Amino acid sequence: MVQSAKGQKKKPNNLFGFFFNYQITIILLVLLITLVRQSFLTNNFPFVLYDKQQIINQNISINQTLDEKNKQLSVELKAESEANLEILESIARYKFGLLKKGERYYQISQSR
């Protein structure tokens, strides 16, 4: 039996044959090494998490103090606005004779 040259598979030489057979494995290893190097050496992996957590804790404490300050300021504003409303109400009653619901107005005139 005679086989033609076209029907046979061409084998690469030994050096490139290894890379040809394991090309996906080699690509994945290079990718893994690159990611590990970037995470640990370039990005300083475990320590950057601690730094970010400290920043988050600082922001939480700042937000809590700002919330307390906002509550205090809103109480002060409410107290001032109630006082201003009382002054406004007394001016409206005196100048314009306005009444609240359920109140009666009596006008007393002096006779001469």
Image: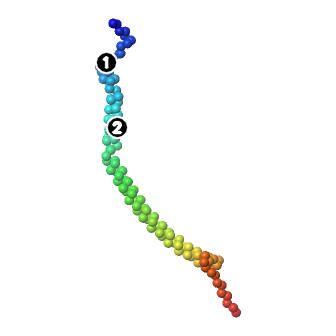
Q: Is residue 14 above or below residue 112?
A: above
Q: Is residue 102 left or right of residue 46?
A: right
The residue shown at (34%, 39%) is 38
- Which of the 4 quarters of the picture holds residue 70? bottom left
Instruction: Name the amino acid, label 1.
Output: Asn
Residue 46: % across, % down: 31, 46
Which quarter of the picture shows residue 12?
top left
Residue 78 pos. (x, y %): 50, 70
Q: Is residue 58 above or below residue 69?
A: above
Q: Earlier in the sequence, mark 2 or mark 1?
A: 1
Relative to 100, does residue 50 appear above or below in the rendering?
above
* Residue 54 image offset from top left, x and y in percent: 35, 53
Q: Which residue is depicted at the point 53% across and 74% down?
A: 83
Label 2 Cα crowd, 10 Å radius (few <14 / some 14-19 / many 20+): few
Which residue is denoted by mark 2 in the rendering?
Answer: 35
What kind of element bears circle 2? helix
Q: Quadrant of the N terminus?
A: top left
Q: Residue furthest top?
A: 1
Residue at image x 36%, y 13%?
Answer: 8
Q: Amino acid at mark 2?
A: Leu
Q: Is residue 95 visible?
A: no
Residue found at the far right of this picture: 112
Q: State the residue position of label 1.
A: 13
Residue 101: x and y in percent read 61, 76
Residue 98 vs 49, above or below: the answer is below
